[in-house]
Image: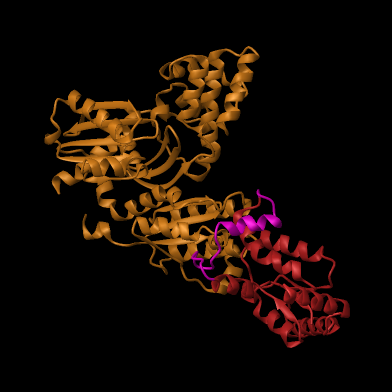
Chain colours: A red, B orange
Amino acid sequence: MAKVFIYPINSLILADLVERFGHKPLTMMSQIRGKVTSLSLDSPPINITPEDPKLGLKYAAIEVPAGVRGRMSLIGPLIEQTEAAIIVENPPTDFGCVGCNRTNELTKYLVRSKGVPVLEVKYPESDEEARDFVNEIVAFLESLPKEKPEDEKVEEKESAEKEDKK
Amino acid sequence: MSAEESSLVKIALVSCGSEYAGVQPEFEEAAAKVNAKFIYPEIDVASIDTIGKDFGLEVASGDLRLMMARAKAVVEGTTNAEGVFITTCFRCAEGAIVRNEVRRYIHEHSNIPVISYSFTESTSAGTLLTRLEALTTIVRRRHLLTREVQTGLTAGIDSGSTTTKAVIMRDNKIIGKGWVPTTKVLESAEEAYSIALEEAGVARKEIQAIGTTGYGRFLIGNHLKAQLIQEEITVNSKGAVYLANKQKGNATVIDIGGMDNKAISVQDGIPGMFTMGGICAGASGRFFEMISKRLGVDITELGALAVKGMHENVSMNSYCIVFGTQSLVNSLAKGATPEDVAAAACYSVVEQIYEQQLQEVDVKEPLILVGGSSLIAGVPKALGELLKINVLVPENSHMIGAVGAALLASGFVEE
């Protein structure tokens, strides 16, 4: 199972496709869910406080607008976990959108420069293109390892044992 | 306060995603303080993909296109908004373009008052309060703002950051004035008010209504049991068009205060679009105080000095009061004359107002310059040169807040 970054990061269709092929989609929805279900915070509607754009400084400098850094405080940690990525170019708004193109540009750049397998596909405009679109994504997802590599499993086991000892 | 004046005002929030910057609760808090509620105009999601072509402004960010779609919903009346607050991230060029054009679009296609603001994660409810108070006042008190004549015996007190002004008006005439530096807010107000009363030759108990404005308006208003406690945007624009005798038609008011500036587009005495602020005190009266001190002249002499100078001879940038003062010191060290330095200071301040604020307000003549800095003769001269239009400085231009408050307070005499 690979952790697959999807772009647009809130695309339900892409998230569903990734899940159907046994991988874990990295989505904005899960990040926001984490925010709104966390206790002791009251900053509606999505519990982002002025501290979050400061956390976004890890990914973008202070002169980058607060809205970009606030979004990056949610997206950045997902990019760090990314093992593979699917980027859909020119999607319509209802396919998924985080609203800010500066965030999109930075997000795609960080994913591409991470050195993980990345599939870049254009959003389809006909039935035939739609079939090709899905087939390409399916082939990409099938090419990703279903199981974690042995060395990663060992590492995870070791860290779990360390935690238990504590 | 009438039922209409205390009613909830619905403000359409047209933003590029302020919830991601952590400032949404600050927006909500400021709105709640003025009994307003943000609403979010409903639109068809698919229209976000086509609105760029419809609007004529094609941008890449989905939330900026959402702003255009929401503005269209406001103008077309598919949403029941009484005011509009347009806001985008500070330092975003794409956001700034859309913010300006959306504001212009709403202003040109509807009578709904609109304000705009660029936020950072540090934006606080306090920063927004005056702006939202002005917006809701224009909605709630439109009938009061149409008042053109002062009646009865009323007082107005303007508690500014640098000076406190008071006027007494009777039957549409100023009969007493007081102008003192602001030290302790209440004591300064009492002093200015007493001076004005003495000059007018009337006793405190004879005053039929009091209006207060400026930073200390709530404290002074509650202390004096004022009938009108009002932010300075609506009051100052009213005072400016009244003193300039330009109450009908379009006008633009520029108010250079001790700590901040306001640029207000006015129609028939009622503000339409306005901006407030400045990046730094470098574009305010405080900068002139520092320049005067360094030149060793009284601030009242700075204007006459500036009129004799040539701003082109000195390079000065007042974006920051510290760097502005540094330019001043360097210029004097190089042998610049005090006249040229004073002229450069005036030009630098109006240049910043032009670059920062007048870009966000449609400048329509007459241009009325008010506030304490309007008394520095070099300032209207520099502004006129920069804009290539005549700048009107009405008599008592530094008292606009107090005059506007006394004028509007007279609405409560008849009530």
Percent coordinates x, y for residue B59 in the rendering: 63, 59
The residue range painted magenta reads: A39-63
> Considering only vertical position in the picture, is B295 above or below B180?
above
Q: Seen from this angle, which residue lies furthest front?
A: A165
| B218 versus B393 height, above or below | below
Q: Would you say residue B176 is visible in this rendering?
A: no
The reply to whether residue A54 is visible in this rendering is yes
Q: Where is residue A27 shown, x and y percent of the image?
A: 67, 74
Measuring 41% from the left and 58% from the top, which residue is drawn there?
B29
In what quadrant of the picture does the C terminus of chain A appear? Answer: bottom right
Q: In the rendered view, would you say B355 is above or below B144? A: above
Q: For residue B34, which quarter of the picture?
A: bottom left
Image coords of residue B22 (percent x, y): 54, 59
Image location of residue B107, percent across then percent down: 44, 53
Above or below, B168 relative to B93: above
User: Depth check: B303 or A159 in front?
Assistant: A159
Q: Quarter holding the N terminus of chain A?
A: bottom right
Residue occupying the point 72% across, 84% down: A19
Residue B27 lies left or right of residue B234; in this view the side is right
Q: Is the stretch drawn in magenta largely helix, strand or loop?
A: loop
Q: Kindly identify the residue that appears in the image at 52 percent across and 27 percent down.
A: B385
**Quarter of the figure with residue B112:** bottom left
Front in this rendered view, residue A87 or B98: A87
Residue B187 is left or right of residue B311, and the answer is: left
Total numbered circles = 0
Horizontally, is A17 left or right of B102 in the view?
right
Q: Is residue A47 magenta?
A: yes
B285 sits left or right of A17 in the view: left
Q: Is residue B240 magenta?
A: no
